[in-house]
Amino acid sequence: MFRRRLALAIGCAMLATTPAAAHDLPQRHVMNAFVKLDDQQAHLVIRVPLDLLTSVRFPQNGQQIDLSTDSAAMQRALDAIAHDVALWEGATPLRAASSLGRLSLPSDRSFERYEDAVAHVAEPLEAGTGIYYGQGFLDARFTYPIVSADSRFSIRTLVVAELRDYVKLAVRYLPSNGTSSAFLISAQDGRVVLNPAWYQAAGAFVILGVEHILSGIDHLLFLLCLVIPVVRLRQVVPIVTAFTVAHSFTLIGSAYGVGPDGPWFPPFVETAIAATILYMALENILGGDVRRRWLITGIFGLVHGFGFSYGLKENLQFAGRHLLVSLLTFNVGIEIGQLAVLVVLLPVLLLLRRSALAGRAGVVVLSAIVGHTAWHWMIERGQALRTVRWPKMDLMSLVTLTRWVAGIALPALAAHWIVRRGGAFFSRRLARERLW
């Protein structure tokens, strides 16, 4: 039975193979910044593309900026940046004690290192330099008095906030002691803590996990398929637990960089997730053994863990030095979200199974609706998968594949053996009690 289920799952994944075009990512404007801490001061050194300074107009001489009369415009630009890119020490907003700015050519590469950026901002613009409007940068340095370099610091950007995620601020945080870190944030991220405490990271990732599961319609449909034929709570617990343990395994592995990589893998995972939903819907329709559902659910949970990792990847930068805590609490958030869904879902299913969709017909109808949706998803995602280049199977790829196959197969076989041994043990014990 188990081999037939696994073969059906693999067959579902292989069906999704029709060509189509992938979607292009939108172009984004990116600002570059450093936040450097000293004992009594914080320094913000930032480079802003001129076309993002929509509230400031520099005087022009034809198509170029009139650099001889830009002092007033420069001060307005510095004031605008200081307002839109703000720093906090704890709950206290910082006020710049000094500011300095200059214009730069698009070809300048000074912002690759903090020391080079600071030196560049202090240098006057060379005589005879011509900068076309909207094609250069405004480079600025702000200095803020602080109470202690050991405080919690946060940053927020509102530069062209109406564009939301299309305008990014790349921040390199350089504490006075400790490890530097990098962030890529936008206006919709709000205030971002640069050096979060473990409990701040934990709280943020619990919320992120809840939001992720509640907004992941494919994960919710998979959860629905799992519980459609289940009528007892004691049957739900091992199924959801197996799903949790399995997706935690691949989620943590991906976060630590030991998972497969390349442009082919995300569309492959998305296609496989749709295939898992379709498989569970078909199993419901055909009448699979619910008692063994936890095992196949655990295997499919490994696939969903990779899907969770893509939703988490861009947010791991906010974990600071607390990566493992953030991963674990993200899983806690996912489980809280799943339990919240089940609290609502199970009574509704029970009501439907006792009224409009009673008996076996209800399982078939509900599963057919979900399976129809999953089938279309699998075809669409499979079309996108056909457009990406698959990796060459070199030695490193084979090593990675072997690790993941072993990591998936060994826990599955161990769990299957434990359950079989445990079932045999309890059966013998029950038989002895009956004899007595």
Image (spheres, helix red, strand yellow):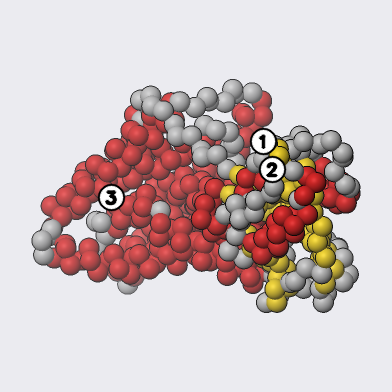
The residue lying at 73 percent from left, 48 percent from top is 138
Residue placed most toward the observer, 201 or 284: 201
Badge 2 marks a residue whose secondary structure is strand
| Image location (x, y in percent) of residue 353 | 16, 62
Residue type at mark 3 is: Asp
Please tell me whether residue 207 is drawn above or below residue 278 in the rendered image. below
- Marks 3,2: beta carbons within 8 A: no
Say which amino acid is labelled 1.
Answer: Gln
Count residues near mark 1 (Cα–Cα under 10 Å), then give few for <14, some for 14-19, many for 20+. few
Disc 2 versus disc 1: distance between alpha carbons? 7 Å
Q: Position of residue 169 (x, y in %)?
A: 65, 52
Q: Are marks 2 and 1 in contact (CB under 8 Å)?
A: yes
Q: Residue at x 30, y 56 (%)?
A: 224
**In the shown orientation, is residue 231 left or right of residue 306?**
left
Amino acid of disc 2? Gln
* Residue pointed to by mark 2: 60
Reading the chain from its start, which is encountered first: label 3 or label 2? Answer: 2
Q: Position of residue 386 (x, y in %)?
A: 43, 26
Asked whether 362 or 88 is in front, the reply is 88
Quarter occupied by the N terminus:
top left
Which residue is label 1 attached to? 63
Q: Secondary structure at mark 3?
A: loop
Q: Quadrant of residue 4?
A: top left
Categorize mark 2 by other alpha carbons within 10 Å: few (<14), some (14-19), many (20+). some
Marking on residue 289: 3
Residue 112 visible? The answer is no
Q: Which one is closest to the eye, mark 3 or mark 1?
A: 1
Q: 208 and 93: which one is in front?
A: 93
Q: Which is nearer the N-term, disc 3 or disc 1?
A: 1
Q: Residue at x 45, y 67 (%)?
A: 336
